[in-house]
Amino acid sequence: MPYTTRQLSTQQILICGAAIVTVSMGIRHGFGLWLQPITQDQNWGRETFALALALQNLVWGLAGIFAGMLADRFGAFRVIVAGAVFYALGLVGMAYATSPVMFALTTGVLIGLAQAGTTYAIVYGVIGRNVHASKRSWAMGIAAAAGSFGQFLMVPTEGFLIDRFGWQEALVVLAGASLLMIPLAWWLREPDFRGGAGHFREQSILQALREALHYRSFQLLMAGYFVCGFQVVFIGVHMPSYLKDHGLSPQVASYSLALIGLFNVFGTYASGVLGQRMQKKHILAFIYFTRAIVISVFLLVPLTPMSVYVFSAVMGLLWLSTVPPTNAAVAQIFGVAHLSMLGGFVFFSHQIGSFLGVWLGGVLYDSTGSYDIVWYIAIALGVVAALLNLPIKEAAIVRAPAPQAA
């Protein structure tokens, strides 16, 4: 079928894409609430839970590259449907796994595959192909804000489900909720992919990949995103246990994660809007440096419910606000034909950082009885990431014209 120029409406993309990200990201943001119930009932150390979550983030990042390739070639619909099915199976497996190996395979591998097919890289590919460049960063900010709203909505809901039904039954309920992404994906079927027809490209996958991986600014974006993953996943998974270790109630942890999600709605939307007006590298450098300052102040002041709520609100403004400018910069530099795949590579770097953040949190806690070392690493990495983003060149890459056939 020949390539057509008909596109999905921006409103349709934002409503359905935002709803999918709300469900997918909303569920995964609450996983830290299960750390203590699962490890206590199963008599596992925190490292076992942390390793499964670390594996989940690594699989998510690695599978995201291939999910992006498939979405670029065949459209997002099929990828999201597969991701929703994996999500439901993984959550049920997480509920009933009886050994660390089974827990790692379900919570780590299955849910990691699910997230690869239902989160930002896939939805941003649809946005990039169907939303004009003048509104692209703004639209990506809307999608990222939806993921944050999902955290605000779902984390307290997940806490309620655990208290009301128990941690296993709560996971089964979430498995059913994850299947709602399938009907939502129906409205993201792109006309250009009917019958398996791909989007027009001037490069092959290997050519686009070789170009990006050898481009200095792409390397710097990946390095900065590594730090983003380390910081947010360490905090998201280990924060509830960190607060409980210091004598604060589980409700404080739930409210903390919910506040992060609520304020991230505003932070991600603002960064998307600013990305249309400012250089994206300056936005990213500010976010990373400010994170380092906020974490430092949090560790210096007395730990009280109020200090936790203030930290959560400020950190929420910075939480996923890196997502719109990072992905918009990739689209601006390389174009949109391979955006899901290239976004998947950048996100893989993010997930390597996520793996180390969540895993080191568990390992160092089990060996030292404290999270202090990981907090200090998060501060140092924030400063490094701010400096790495400053030399990025955001102008569209100039390619030699393709040779014409005789």
Image (spheres, helix red, strand yellow):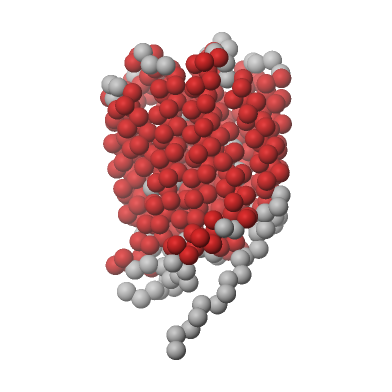
Q: Position of residue 8 (x, y in %)?
A: 43, 63
Q: The N terminus lies in which quarter of the figure?
A: bottom left
Query: Which quadrant would residue 114 be assigned to in this image?
Result: top left
Residue at (51%, 77%) from the top-left corner?
A: 402
In the rendered view, tell whether residue 244 sits above or below residue 76. above
Q: Is residue 236 visible?
A: no
Residue at (56%, 10%) from the top-left corner?
A: 247
Q: Position of residue 4 (x, y in %)?
A: 40, 74
In the rendered view, tell whether residue 217 sits above or below residue 166. below
Query: Which quadrant would residue 35 be assigned to in this image?
Result: top left
Relative to 175, 296 lies left or right? right
Residue at (48%, 72%) from the top-left corner?
A: 202
Q: Is residue 275 visible?
A: yes
Q: Position of residue 396 (x, y in %)?
A: 62, 65
Q: Nearer the viewer, residue 185 or 389?
A: 389
Q: The C terminus lies in which quarter of the figure?
A: bottom left
Relative to 304, 80 lies left or right? left
Number of callouts: 0
Q: Nearer the viewer, residue 124 or 143?
A: 124
Residue at (31%, 41%) from the top-left corner?
A: 86
Q: Position of residue 21 (x, y in %)?
A: 45, 44
Relative to 312, 44 lies left or right? left
In the rendered view, tell whether residue 38 sits above or below residue 67. above
In the rendered view, tell whether residue 78 sits above or below residue 38. below
Residue found farthest to the top: 247
